[in-house]
Amino acid sequence: MNTATRLRTPRIKVADEVWIATALLHRENPRRADFEISEIIERVQREGLCDRLRPGVYQHIAQHCVANRPASPGRYRMLFATGRKTRRLFRPGDWSHASRRGAKTVPAREDIPAAYHPLLDWYEKDYAAAGRAQQDPILGLRGLGKDLWKGEDPDEYVRRLREGWA
């Protein structure tokens, strides 16, 4: 992005800047599952959405944007910690800490420069969809059958099922 575009761009949120950098890394390296925190910081700098690297970038990558960490104080769900120093984009179906439920997972289209809108489309069409397809089928059974004996005593339900057994 050139300087003229950057100057016309409204001040972007640090979390959105981090998401954009991580999404770009995923698109540029489709075979990689995750990235080192330092790689994401470097990509933020290289993209140059702001005049300088803001002090909050590291903290957003390490904690504020990380779905599977307790919220403190940022509660975004934009990244997922795959290791102590590795991150990837959050996908629907990923576990997230209870303090982050319902939190923002992607930038609002109107909050980022138009040049990055295709990243939001890629995320929804390709990245998030691939995550939904990879969900564990066994874990997907969780809660199945919870209404089997709804309104009935469980012991009575089992007795009724066993009627007529030899």
Image (cartoon, grey):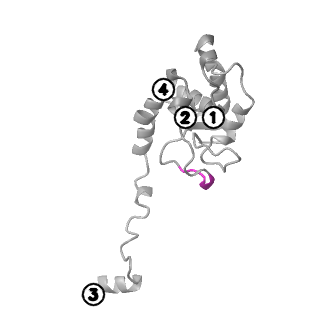
Q: Earlier in the sequence, mark 4 or mark 1?
A: 1
Q: Is residue 107 left or right of residue 161?
A: right
The residue that label 1 is drawn on is 15
Label 2 sits on a secondary structure element that is loop
Q: Do residues under tags 4 and 1 come within 8 Å of each other at their CB atoms?
A: no
> Which of the pair 25/149 is nearer the observer?
149
Amino acid carrying label 2: it is Pro
Q: Do residues under tags 3 and 1 come within 8 Å of each other at their CB atoms?
A: no
Q: Earlier in the sequence, mark 2 or mark 4?
A: 2
The residue that label 4 is drawn on is 117
**Percent position (x, y) of residue 163?**
27, 87
- Using a 10 Å C-alpha cutoff, classify the residue at mark 4 as few (fewer than 14 neighbours), some (14 to 19) or many (20 or more): some
Who's the residue at 39% across and 44% down the image? 133
Q: Which residues are magenta?
A: 95-99
The residue that label 3 is drawn on is 163
In the image, is residue 43 above or below residue 85?
A: above
Question: Per the image, is 64 magenta?
Answer: no
Q: Do residues under tags 3 and 2 come within 8 Å of each other at their CB atoms?
A: no
